[in-house]
Each structure stands twice: as structure tokens, then as C-alpha cells.
Image (spheres, rainbow, N blue to C red):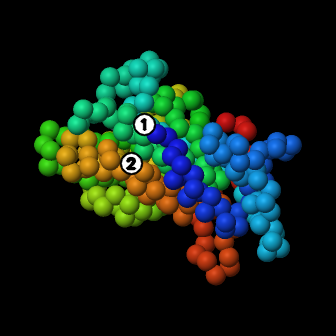
Amino acid sequence: MTSRGTPGILAGLVRLVRPIRLVALVAPGLGLGLAGLPGDARAQLADPVRTGATTAGGEAPATRSEVPVRIALQAGHWRASEAPDELARLRSNGTMGGGRHEWEVTLEIARHAAGLLEARGYEVEILPTTIPPGYRADLFIAIHADGFHSPAASGFSVAAPRRDATGQGQAFADVLAGHYRAASGLRHRVATRRMQGYYAFNARRYRHALDPRTPAVILEAGFLTSPADREILFHAPDRLAQGIAAAVEEFLPLAPRLPNERPAVVPVATEPLTDR
Ligand SMILES: [Zn+2]
């Protein structure tokens, strides 16, 4: 499994031509040149030549982009055996299809998406099954894959929490569904109530759940039990990741928008996320 292929990094470099402010991501005093590229995509952002283009337009800096925008991608069922006692039922679930476990597929999609997003300047964390108690991010996306007894079941679905204190989950779910459908070509299925009640969304019941201020969704990326869905789940996870990354960029753009652009959804986190 490759996590950050060279094509992804090159694509990221192309994207960096547009003006962005990534002040907090520039490590002071670190002489990071091209040598840092393969191992750490974020090192690109420390290149003063590229970040220097930022202020060329004389725009006032946007407050939000002074701090990293943190995107959490959860690889569904990854390291499930480490689930805490309150979530012991998760230790042995997850679907299988085509000889692969769900966690292998979700982790691969998450790694591709992380590579794309990091190259574009986001701070990305890939989370396993166990969520650190009170975990907070600017956006959380749980990635899963479905299974069914009939190979005819096919398609993806996206759900926001049933109880959503942020009020943003459904808006992002809609944005993600649009981009994911375009990227995957899969049918968009109606989300289930079970998805809306995902354990990570339920801080009232579980200690290992998200801070309720974190906008969150769960994506069922396709059916592992469908040969048609497996074609893309197994052979084009990078395309699926592009759908995810495009949705994040639309919902939480790093670059300040021009006055005639559609207004961005106001992000929750305007302060540094050091208190998580
Ligand atoms: Zn799952």
C-alpha cells in the first residue's frame, strides 16, 4: 500500500501556485529545501519562495489561516482490537470482500486523502478506531465500507450526526456527497440511522468520542461485497481520495475568498487547537 505517491505530491505542488497563507505551518529556522520533500509533504510549505507569493496581492491576512486547519480522517476499523472496554463490540467487526478487510481499504483511502490535503496545506491526522477522548478538529471524516449478503448492493452514503451541536455536519455531508459521487461514479444511497448514531459522534455516551464542537460526517465509501464497487475501492483509491479532498477544500478553503466568490461556511475553530 502506498500512502503518498509522487503524483500526489506533484499535484500538490501545482496547487500551491495559488495564493495561500500558511504562516503557522512554516517552521521558523528550519532550512527545509527539496531534500525534505519525499518524507514530509508539509516541508514544501516552508519554502519561502512559494509562501512568499501569498502577500503579493497586498491582501490583509485572514485570521483563520494563521493557524493550521486540522482535518481528521478516521480509517474505519483500523486497529480495532485496541478499542477500549466501552467500545468492546467494535473489536471484532468490520466487513470483508474480495479477500480484503475493511480497515485495509479505509486506511488506504485515508492515506491518499491525507497526502493530497497535506500537500495543499492542511494539517491531517489519521485516526484509528479509538478516538482520543474529547478529540477536536476543524473537520472529522470517518471512512468505512459497507458489506451485504447480496453482491448486488452497491453505492456510497454519507451521514452527519443525528445530534449535531455544530450545525455544519449536514452541510458538509452534502458537499462531500457531491464530490464523492463525481470522483467515484458510484450511486449515492440514503444514509442509515445507524450511521447518524456513529459512536464517535456520541460524547454523551462514550468517553472515546469527538468534542461536540467538531463538525463530523461518516462516509460509507462503497460495498466491499460488490464486485463493481471493489473495482474502484481496490484499484482507484486515489480517485476516491480526490473526491474527499475536493470536498474539504470547498468546505474549509485555506485561501481567503475574493469578494465576488461564494461565501465560505464559517469554521468553528478560529483559535489555535491547543486545548484539545
Ligand atoms: Zn465499517
Query: Residue beneath label 2, please?
Result: 237
SS assignment at label 1: loop
Q: Identify the image quadrant of the N terminus.
A: top left
User: Circle 1: is it few (<14), some (14-19), or many (20+) Cα within 10 Å?
Assistant: few
- Residue 40 is situated, as x and y percent measured from the top left of the image, at 65, 41
User: Quick check: 271 left or right of 121?
Assistant: right
Gap between marks 1 and 2 measured at Cα: 10 Å
Query: Residue beneath label 1, please?
Result: 1
Q: 273 and 56: which one is in front?
A: 56
- Disc 1 residue: CB within 8 Å of ligand 1: no
Q: Residue at x 37, y 33 (%)?
A: 103
Count up the numbered dots.
2
Q: Residue at x 14, y 49 (%)?
A: 152
Q: What's the residue type where badge 2 is placed? A: Pro
- Residue 120 is situated, as x and y percent measured from the top left of the image, at 61, 56
Vertical position of residue 140 compared to residue 176: above or below: above
